[in-house]
Image (cartoon, rainbow, N blue to C red):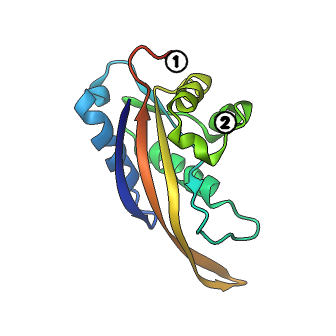
């Protein structure tokens, strides 16, 4: 099993996530593949210590944002799976936050979503700034990993 991880401060920097993915996949020679590799972003797990925000799921928001960043910036050799497809694949498996630490569940999700790689992560900290009727800002610290199923696992 291959796990590469980095801790990032999530501030919406468009270069951060693509850099993580590139660093994780480059050593395996996957970014120069003739056929595009598929990658999906899983709803991020949320640590119990993270404050809840009514009407918002920080894990899903982080995954939505990460997917949008990858879709805008991924190289041609990387095909990003839609959030709708990933959400359906997670629902089909009754996915739970704790599943990001279970290799068998990650492999099953990768197969169900037809993903060669999964971006997984944990929202470690969240702080909301300036809540008002005109809007608010939030900062989160997330831990991001790229999971690649082991060789010999079912592949998409």
Q: Which mark is residue 156?
A: 1
Relative horizontal placement of residue 93, taking residue 111 as reference (left or right): right
Q: Which residue is mark 2?
A: 90
Q: Where in the figure is residue 21, as x and y percent of width and height?
A: 36, 42
Q: Residue at position x 53%, y 60% from top? A: 123
Relative horizontal placement of residue 142, taking residue 22 as reference (left or right): right
Q: Quadrant of residue 132?
A: bottom right
Task: Label 2, secondary structure: give it.
Answer: helix
Q: Is residue 15 visible?
A: no
Q: Where in the figure is residue 153, as x and y percent of width and height?
A: 47, 17
Could you classify mark 2 by the number of other residues whose Cα lies within 10 Å: few (under 14), some (14-19), or many (20 or more)? many
- Are discs 2 and 1 less than 8 Å apart at CB? no
Q: Is residue 24 visible?
A: yes
| Dot 2 or dot 1, earlier in sequence | 2
Task: Label 1, secondary structure: give it.
Answer: loop
Cα–Cα gap, marks 2 and 1: 16 Å
Q: Where in the figure is residue 69, as x and y percent of width and height?
A: 47, 50
Q: Quadrant of residue 25?
A: top left
Quarter holding the N terminus? top left
Relative horizontal placement of residue 33, taking residue 54 as reference (left or right): left
Q: Residue at position x 70%, y 71% from top? A: 53
């Amino acid at each position: 099993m291959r796990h590469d991880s980095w801790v990032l401060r999530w501030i919406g920097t468009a270069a951060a996530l693509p850099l993580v993915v590139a660093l994780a996949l480059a050593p395996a020679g996957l970014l120069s593949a003739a056929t595009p590799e598929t990658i999906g972003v899983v709803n991020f797990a949320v640590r119990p210590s993270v404050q809840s925000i009514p009407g918002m799921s920080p894990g899903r928001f982080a995954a939505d944002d990460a997917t949008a960043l990858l879709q805008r910036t991924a190289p041609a050799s990387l095909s990003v799976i839609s959030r709708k497809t990933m959400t359906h694949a997670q629902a089909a498996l009754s996915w739970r936050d704790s599943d990001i630490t279970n290799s068998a569940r990650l492999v099953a999700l990768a197969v169900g979503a037809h993903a060669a790689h999964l971006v997984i992560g944990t929202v470690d900290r969240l702080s909301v700034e300036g809540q008002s009727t005109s809007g608010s800002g939030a900062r989160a610290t997330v831990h991001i990993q790229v999971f690649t199923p082991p060789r010999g696992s079912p592949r998409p």
